[in-house]
Amino acid sequence: MKLYIQSKKYGSNVVLKDVSIEFPEGSATLVIGASGGGKSTLMKSLVGLTKFKGYLLKDGNSRVRFNRKNICYISQQPLLNPKETVIQCLYYQTLLSFPNMSKTEALQYAKCFIQRFALSKVENQRIRSLSGGQQKRAAIAHGMLRNLPVIVADEIDSGLDCVLGESIIRDLCRIAHQEHKTLVVISHNLDNIRFFDNIVILAGDEHGTGRVVYSGPTKAVLKHFEAKDIKEVMHIVSNKRYRQNTQDKEEVL
Ligand SMILES: Nc1ncnc2c1ncn2[C@@H]1O[C@H](COP(=O)(O)OP(=O)(O)OP(=O)(O)O)[C@@H](O)[C@H]1O
Ligand SMILES: [Mg+2]
């Protein structure tokens, strides 16, 4: 899947410019960058929730548009029905996603996801009564059970304690690799980058417009920025002079 955003504006505010990112099939990509830098806007453009100037292709070579029905989007603020219990919520979604499943099979299938995302204790609680982290896990389970080839998750580990956050990220990356799914995740937690194949770093230019300053393998990012760790990379890219230099180079190229 290849996303190209020539520009994305809200009114006269240009939030993203010249964004070109390949998300290889079966790989896990982490998107990082400063708050307000355009990460959620990038995700919404990817899943078709906001209009932009550009395109989403199946891959860079075929020029065939990517069908967004294949994308499961887990938003920054989970949008589940607050009146339903966790098991109802997952069961109804299973029936909707797999109309040929019997009710018994659907219930079993939903229960698998309850277990997988450690929700057994609260399966009969209403969504509105869950803690923030439990709601987030319910939203991830609700999205994942649709079994779509692309999973896009915004701040997937916010509201989760670091142990649970790490285990969910690790599991999702494993699922992406084993089941050949394309996973795209936004996170502010830099401790889990080792689970991802690729990293995309967004940083604002001198006008505050979001630009991709790195898009490539996780293992090459430190060398690329000549940094000792990823935190240093984030300091480097938020430095105004670095951004100015990068842009000058782009213009020369
Ligand atoms: N619907 C909207 N209308 C107008 N401006 C918007 C809208 N959505 C986002 N913005 C603005 O676009 C910019 C990028 O927002 P976005 O939500 O993409 O940032 P983000 O990188 O996801 O930040 P965070 O890490 O805080 O979630 C911000 O300046 C924000 O105020
Ligand atoms: Mg956001």
Image (spheres, grey):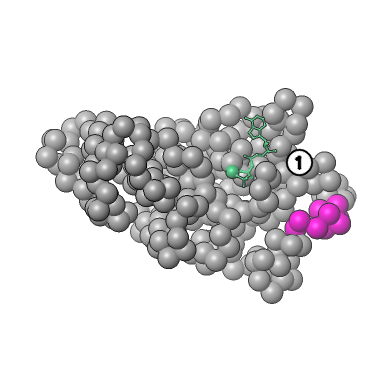
**Cβ(mark 1) to ligand 1 < 8 Å?**
no
Secondary element under disc 1, as helix, strand or loop, is: loop
In which of the image's four quarters is ligand 1 placed? Answer: top right
Amino acid on which the number 1 mark rests in the picture: Thr
**Residue at label 1?**
209
- Residue sitting at x 86%, y 57%: 241
Q: Quadrant of residue 207?
A: top right
Location of residue 151 in the rendering, given as x and y in whole percent from the top left corner: 44, 45
**Residue 240 to residue 19: above or below:** below
Location of residue 173 in the rendering, given as x and y in whole percent from the top left corner: 43, 58
Asked if residue 51 can be seen in this view, the reply is: yes
Asked if residue 63 can be seen in this view, the reply is: no
Q: Is residue 161 left or right of residue 32?
A: left
Total number of numbered discs in the rendering: 1
In the image, which residues are magenta? 237-246
Within the magenta stretch, is there residue 230?
A: no
